[in-house]
Amino acid sequence: MAYNSIYLWLRWSMGNAMVLRKSCLLGLLVCSSAWGQTYTGEDIGAVATSGSHSVAGSVVTINASGADIWGTSDEFYFYHYTLVGDGEISAKIVSITNTHEWTKANVMMRESIAPNSKYAMMMMTPGVKGADFEYRTTTGGSAGPSGQSDLSSTLPHWVRVRRTGDLFEGFKSSDGITWTLYRSITISMSASIEIGLALTSHVDGTLATAVFDDINGVSTPTACPWDSSILQSDPLCVECPWVSGILESNPLCIEPPPPPSRTLSWTNPTENTDATPLDDLAGIYIYDADTDARIYTYLTTTPGATEQVTFDTTSLCFKATAFDTSNNESVYSGTACYVPTEDGKPYIL
């Protein structure tokens, strides 16, 4: 059965604590808005019927009209935030109503909300047209590429778009763990772009519905928009590297490097999503939250029990799922990260 997510936290070994400059931690908190915590939902282009979105836990549902995301101008619904610099976004596309064979649900990076904007997106269709990576390389130019989409990909499916400078890459995955680079394109875009989830019904005036889950955004800004009123300027921290907002092992920011041993604790779920008792719990999967790689399996059959495990890993951020005897998984837990403050205690995102 499908069942509720678990709550994951960390136990920190004081003897192995690393020292993080306070100004770097303040910078992390100030810059959190720069890596996509506030989404806006809106119609792009002159759609005949207005779209909408709803959020329930980790699931985002979008209803959208629109003629297409194609040609020289687009019509669709966009649930998005502003990204500055390099980054990526991935999501599991759970379902799409079959309004048209070219109804498109996708993760998108877009230079602006103008209908004729440059963009790159990794998309899924309801069925026979499968997956594709599409783009517009010039404002008001024709979208591409022409040719066949990947007809072998079916729902549910994970999709990802990554930006590194002017290089935009589209990835796909059947399980959210193993990713395949599908296509890439070079597009000259401004540093500040819009990034998020998009849907067009391909039948303007008729709403389609798409369900998204397991949504992850990662930002690696080259210049963090420091708020000098909050952050006391520390030139040593300006160049600290970022991974999901986590300051990594730059000797100017953290020393010594984080220890290889991590201790995670959690409370097992007790109910299925329909509130019936959970009677077939088989264990917990632990994932690296930055790469979505499964790194540890813990076997347990006791709902509601508080569990703890210590294992060696260089990962800094973790999330977990529960699984049953048929290997059905829950949704992800929240993310727990090792980012200790100067008093040696971890700051948990």
Image: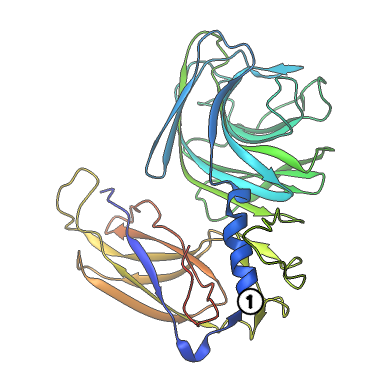
Residue nearer the viewer, 224 or 142 = 224
Please identify the residue farthest to the bottom as the structure is shown: 15
Residue nearer the viewer, 83 or 302 = 83
Residue nearer the viewer, 228 or 135 = 228
Q: Is residue 251 left or right of residue 66?
A: right
Q: Is residue 115 visible?
A: yes
Q: Is residue 333 left or right of residue 174?
A: left
Residue 137 coordinates in the image, percent (x, y): 82, 30
Residue 310 coordinates in the image, percent (x, y): 41, 81
Q: How many marks?
A: 1
Determine whether 283 is above or below 145 in the image.
Answer: below
Residue found 16% across the figure and 58% down from its top:
279
Residue nearer the viewer, 317 or 288 = 317
Please identify the residue farthest to the front as the structure is shown: 229
Q: Which quadrant would residue 131 be assigned to in this image?
A: top right
Q: Secondary structure at mark 1?
A: loop
| Disc 1 residue type (three-letter) | Arg
Q: Which quadrant would residue 222 be assigned to in this image?
A: bottom right
Q: Is residue 104 visible?
A: no
Q: Which quadrant would residue 53 be assigned to in this image?
A: top left
Determine whether 136 is above or below 313 in the image.
Answer: above
Which residue corresponds to mark 1? 21
Residue found 61% across the figure and 50% down from its top:
35
Colouring rule applied to residues: rainbow
Determine whether 110 is above or below 285 in the image.
Answer: above
Residue found 65% across the figure and 53% down from its top:
219
Residue 52 coordinates in the image, percent (x, y): 46, 23
Q: Is residue 112 left or right of residue 53?
A: right
Mark 1 crowdedness (10 Å alpha carbons): few <14, some 14-19, many ≥20 = some
Residue 269 coordinates in the image, percent (x, y): 25, 59
Q: Is residue 162 left or right of residue 179?
A: right
